[in-house]
C-alpha cells in the first residue's frame, strides 16, 4: 500500500451505539470503507452487548464497559486472524450491538380461537388476550437464529416471529394442562402460569428471555358463550345435579311450555312439533323427573292425534312437512 493510499484510509477510534431510535434490537456499526484502529475504544453501555463477527462467524462478545481493542482483548478474533504478535495495522470486522433492555407492555392475543379439550364441556374454543415483556438474553443465539447480518433488526420484526411461537406454545400448554375452562376464567393468573413455563422454554431457543406474561381476559366465541350462559341459567333454576343432561332437558322443557301455551294448538301443538308421537304429559313426566308428583296421563289414541294434527294443518299452525312427518310416525306406531 502506498503512503498516499494509507493516508486516505479512514480509521475508527471509537465504537459506540447511542440507541437514538426506539424499538431497535440489533444494529450493525457502519463500517463501509473504515477500518478499526489498533487500540480503538469500544464503548458498551448498560443494557447493551457488542458482538464481533468475522467472515460470518461470531468471534468475541463484550458486555457493558469501556474496552481497548488489542490482541489481548480480542482473543478469539486474534486466533481466527492468526495474529501471532500484536497487530499494528488496522483491521476490519463487523460489529453488532444488541439492546438487552426489557421490552415492556407488549400486547398479545389469539387471532383465532384455540380448540382445547375440557372436562366439563368436552371440546371448546378459547380466545385470550394479555400483555408480555421480553429481552435479548443470549446475543449469540439471537444473532444466529433470528437477526443475522441485517443492518437493523427491530422489535416489530422479532415480534412477528414471537407471536407464532406464542400461539403454538399456548395451544400446547392449554391442551395438556387439564385445567377446566371455568377455573381458567376465574383465575387468570393460573392460566398465565400454565402458559408461561412452556413459553419461556420456546423463547429461550432463540436467545430471548421471557420476563413477564399475564392474561387480561379469556373468553369463548359468542355462540359458545351463549350456550354456557344458558347452562348456567339452568343450574340457577334448579341445578344440574349429578344427572347434567336430565337437568338441562328439564330447563329446555320448562322454557318451551310458556311458548307453546301461546299457540292456538296448546299442548297438542307441542306434541305435533316434537314429531315423535309423544303426548306432552309423557314428555313432562320423563323430563321433570316426577317434579310435579303426578302420574302420566293415559296415552291418547293414535286416531285422535291424527285428527288433531289435521286440524293444526288446516289452521296453518304447522307446515305440510311437519304434518307428513308426524303422520308417518303415528301410522308406523298404529300398524307396527
Image (cartoon, grey):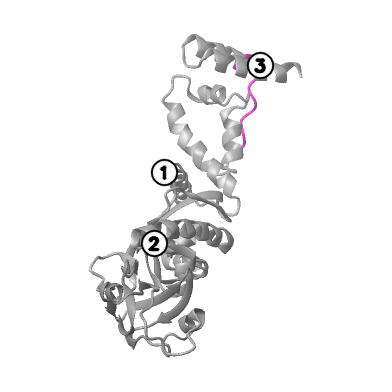
Q: Earlier in the sequence, mark 2 or mark 3?
A: 2
Span colored in magenta: 295-305
Q: Earlier in the sequence, mark 2 or mark 1?
A: 2
**Of all residues shown, which one is farthest toward the top?**
314
The secondary element bearing badge 3 is classed as helix
334 is higher (above) or lower (below) than 225: above
Query: On the picture, is 278 further left or further right than 33?
Result: right
Q: CA distance from mark 3 to mark 1?
A: 38 Å
Crowd class of label 2 (few under 14; some 14 to 19; many from 20; radius 10 Å): few
Q: Which residue corresponds to mark 2?
A: 150
Q: CA distance from mark 2 to mark 1?
A: 44 Å
Query: On the picture, is 111 further left or further right than 5?
Result: right
The secondary element bearing badge 2 is classed as loop
State whether residue 172 appears in this view.
yes
- Name the residue at 45% across, 47% down: 112
**Of all residues shown, which one is farthest toward the right?**
336
Q: Of tags 2 and 1, which is closer to the observer?
A: 2
Is 160 within the magenta? no
For the residue pair 162 and 29, the one nearer the viewer reads as 29
Q: CA distance from mark 2 to mark 3?
A: 75 Å
Amino acid at each position: 500500500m502506498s503512503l498516499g493510499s494509507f493516508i486516505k484510509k479512514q480509521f475508527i477510534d471509537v465504537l459506540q451505539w447511542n440507541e437514538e431510535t426506539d424499538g431497535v434490537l440489533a444494529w450493525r456499526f457502519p463500517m463501509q470503507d473504515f477500518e478499526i484502529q489498533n487500540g480503538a475504544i469500544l464503548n458498551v453501555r448498560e443494557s447493551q452487548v457488542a458482538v464481533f463477527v468475522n467472515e460470518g462467524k461470531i468471534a468475541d462478545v463484550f458486555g457493558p464497559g469501556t474496552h481497548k481493542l488489542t490482541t489481548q482483548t480480542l482473543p478469539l478474533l486474534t486466533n481466527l486472524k492468526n495474529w501471532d504478535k500484536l497487530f499494528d495495522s488496522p483491521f476490519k470486522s463487523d460489529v453488532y450491538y444488541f439492546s438487552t433492555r426489557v421490552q415492556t407492555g407488549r400486547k398479545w392475543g389469539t387471532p383465532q380461537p384455540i380448540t382445547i379439550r375440557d372436562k366439563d364441556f368436552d371440546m371448546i374454543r378459547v380466545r385470550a388476550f394479555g400483555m408480555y415483556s421480553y429481552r435479548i438474553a443470549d446475543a449469540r443465539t439471537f444473532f444466529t437464529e433470528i437477526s443475522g447480518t441485517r443492518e437493523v433488526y427491530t422489535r416489530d420484526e422479532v415480534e412477528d416471529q414471537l407471536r407464532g411461537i406464542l400461539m403454538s406454545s399456548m395451544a400446547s400448554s392449554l391442551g395438556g394442562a387439564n385445567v377446566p375452562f371455568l377455573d381458567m376464567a376465574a383465575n387468570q393468573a393460573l392460566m398465565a402460569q400454565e402458559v408461561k413455563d412452556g413459553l419461556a422454554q420456546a423463547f429461550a431457543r432463540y436467545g430471548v428471555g421471557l420476563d413477564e406474561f399475564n392474561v387480561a381476559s379469556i373468553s369463548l366465541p359468542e355462540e359458545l358463550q351463549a350456550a354456557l350462559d344458558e347452562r348456567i341459567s339452568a343450574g340457577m333454576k334448579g341445578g344440574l345435579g349429578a344427572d347434567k343432561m336430565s337437568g338441562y332437558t328439564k330447563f329446555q322443557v320448562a322454557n318451551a311450555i310458556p311458548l307453546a301455551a301461546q299457540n292456538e294448538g296448546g299442548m297438542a301443538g307441542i306434541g305435533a312439533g316434537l314429531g315423535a308421537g309423544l303426548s306432552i304429559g309423557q314428555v313432562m313426566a320423563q323430563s321433570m323427573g316426577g317434579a310435579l308428583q303426578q302420574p302420566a296421563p293415559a296415552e291418547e289414541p293414535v286416531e285422535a292425534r291424527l285428527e288433531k294434527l289435521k286440524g293444526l294443518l288446516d289452521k296453518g299452525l304447522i307446515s305440510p312437512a311437519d304434518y307428513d312427518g308426524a303422520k308417518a310416525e303415528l301410522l308406523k306406531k298404529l300398524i307396527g
